[in-house]
Image: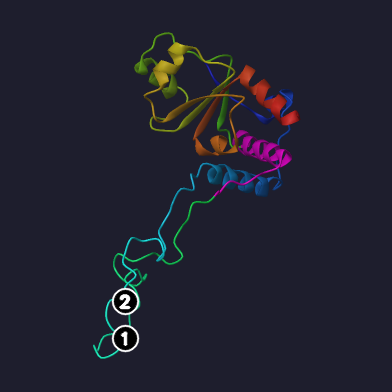
Amino acid sequence: MSATILTAEEAKESKIELITNGKGTQAVHDTVVALRANRRSGTANTKTKGEVALSGAKPWRQKGTGRARAGYKSSPVWTGGGVAFGPKPRDYSKKVPKQTKRLALRKALSSRILAGDVLVTDSFSVAEPKTKKFLTILDGIAPRDSKVLILSDAFDEITFKSARNVKEALLLLAHDVNTEHLLAFDKILVTRRALAIISERLLK
């Protein structure tokens, strides 16, 4: 399998309009923040002083003991007491307009293409379900231990099995790639069919 660096001229031929200025930087930030926020479960929960299972009786009398006044054992200043202003279950999700997402994707792809980090190939597949075969292909794409994102319109089962134990690589369909994916890897290998799909997504 041979792969070549995707140049700006080839990207334009694929109907991918590159962003060469600062436009889209804020869109990238907003999109990545939203993607990460939407993955948060929001299940963190602490008990307040009214929710902990402790007696409501006054620990000792108000005066005469020489100790500080105490009204209840569930006070946040006591060990085992409630938590003041602690986290409660909440929804962290954020909504980003489709146009902003599309601009962010185009900006991220443009920056990676202009940096020479995107390689294009006719197709990607592994003949045998062996991790060693897959690693041999990766060695021709990027230095060992580099993170590589591989985009295609489809992958066969053998290729998936060959790559599933390689944590430095991710096989992803062109329909599913997002801005965060494009920024998280050292090199991006994309098939020509996947490039056409991404181009269609950017034109919508």
* Colour mapping: rainbow
Picture residue at 49% right of the left edge, 12% below the top: 156
Picture residue at 31% right of the left edge, 86% below the top: 62
Q: Quick one: label 2, few (<14), some, or many (20+) residues within 10 Å?
A: few
Compared with residue 134, is residue 104 higher up or lower down, i.e. above or below?
A: below
Foreground residue among 123 and 27: 27
Compared with residue 4, is residue 186 higher up or lower down, i.e. above or below?
A: below
Q: Alpha carbon of mark 1 to alpha carbon of mark 2: how far?
A: 9 Å
What SS does tag 1 mark? loop
Cβ atoms under marks 1 and 2 closer than 8 Å: yes
| 190 part of magenta stretch | no
Picture residue at 62% right of the left edge, 47% below the top: 94
Q: Which residue is disc 2 drawn over? A: 58
| Residue 33 position within the rendered picture, expressed as x and y whole percent measured from the top left | 58, 47
Residue type beneath disc 2: Lys
Foreground residue among 37 and 155: 37
Image: magenta residue range: 91-114
Compared with residue 33, is residue 172 higher up or lower down, i.e. above or below?
A: above
- Relative to 54, 5 lies left or right: right
Residue type beneath disc 1: Gln
Q: Which residue is disc 1 drawn over? A: 62
